[in-house]
Image (cartoon, rainbow, N blue to C red):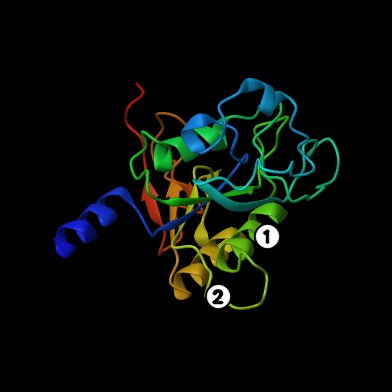
Amino acid sequence: EKQRETASEIEDGSGVKVAVLDSGIDYTHAALGGSGDLVDFENNDPTTIELGTFPTTKVVGGYDFVGSTWPNTAEEPDPDPIDDGPEGGHGTHVADIIGGTMGVAPGVDLYAVKVCSSVSTSCSGIALIQGMEFSLDPNGDGKLSDRVNIINMSLGSSYGQPFDDDLSAAVENATMAGVLTVASAGNSGDKPYANGTPAASPSALSVAQTAVP
């Protein structure tokens, strides 16, 4: 019986910590441990954490390394990693696929690491490096015992080369610490050789989607 329970936990991702480096996560969403009440999302101040809203049973931690107005302003980090703004939603979508109630691994613990803009489709290079460091040491005590198991980045630079990319170096360092990075193979459409970084990092798990023509 104990063996069956262990197998079930592995199948649903229980005990696995996944950092989603993206546009944040809407932790008020019902599929991600929130109330599911639109009012809670609309009344959320993206610069501060309202009592009782975060963390949730699914989104257990995270941090915002860009703020809500970058790149129109400089990065303005704050503790609230909610996925907000007119260009928000991508991080929530990715997190739901990974660990939402109907996700691939609904038992995982999600970390919302906001490194991408709320007002554009850009991601900050500075924030990405900071997000990688956060993922290896979420409580910031200088020890890696609380590191996540997996870092997910559904993003990248087209035709990137790992040898001249700081983010790829960070991926390699994370690998040496025992953390697997999963990254999108490319976001350039149906083009040959369009793999990018950080997916081109030697130790990254590079994944392409094929569901869309």
Q: Earlier in the sequence, mark 2 or mark 1?
A: 1
SS of the residue at dot 2?
Answer: loop
Q: Residue 40 location, x and y as percent?
A: 67, 27
Residue 37: % across, % down: 60, 23
User: Residue at position x 72%, y 43% from top?
Assistant: 51
- Is 160 situated above or below 189? below
List the residue tagged with mark 2: 144
Residue 197 is left or right of residue 43, and the answer is: left
Q: Report how far apart the C-alphas of labels 2 and 1 lie in the structure.
A: 15 Å
User: Badge 2: few (under 14), some or many (20 or more) residues near its Cα, within 10 Å?
Assistant: some
> Nearest the camera: 125 or 107?
107
Q: Is residue 4 visible?
A: yes
Give, as a three-letter code, the residue at label 2: Leu
The N terminus, quarter of image:
bottom left
Please give the residue where the numbered disc 1 appears in the rendered image.
130
Crowding at dot 1, Cα within 10 Å, few <14 / some 14-19 / many 20+, comes out as: some
Taking the image as shown, residue 202 lies to the left or right of residue 136, namely left
State how many labels appear: 2
In the image, which disc is placed on residue 212? none
Q: Residue 82: horizontal and vertical position, in percent?
A: 66, 39
Residue found 67% across the figure and 43% down from its top: 52
The residue under the point 56% across, 45% down is 56
SS label for mark 1: helix
Q: Position of residue 9 (x, y in %)?
A: 28, 55
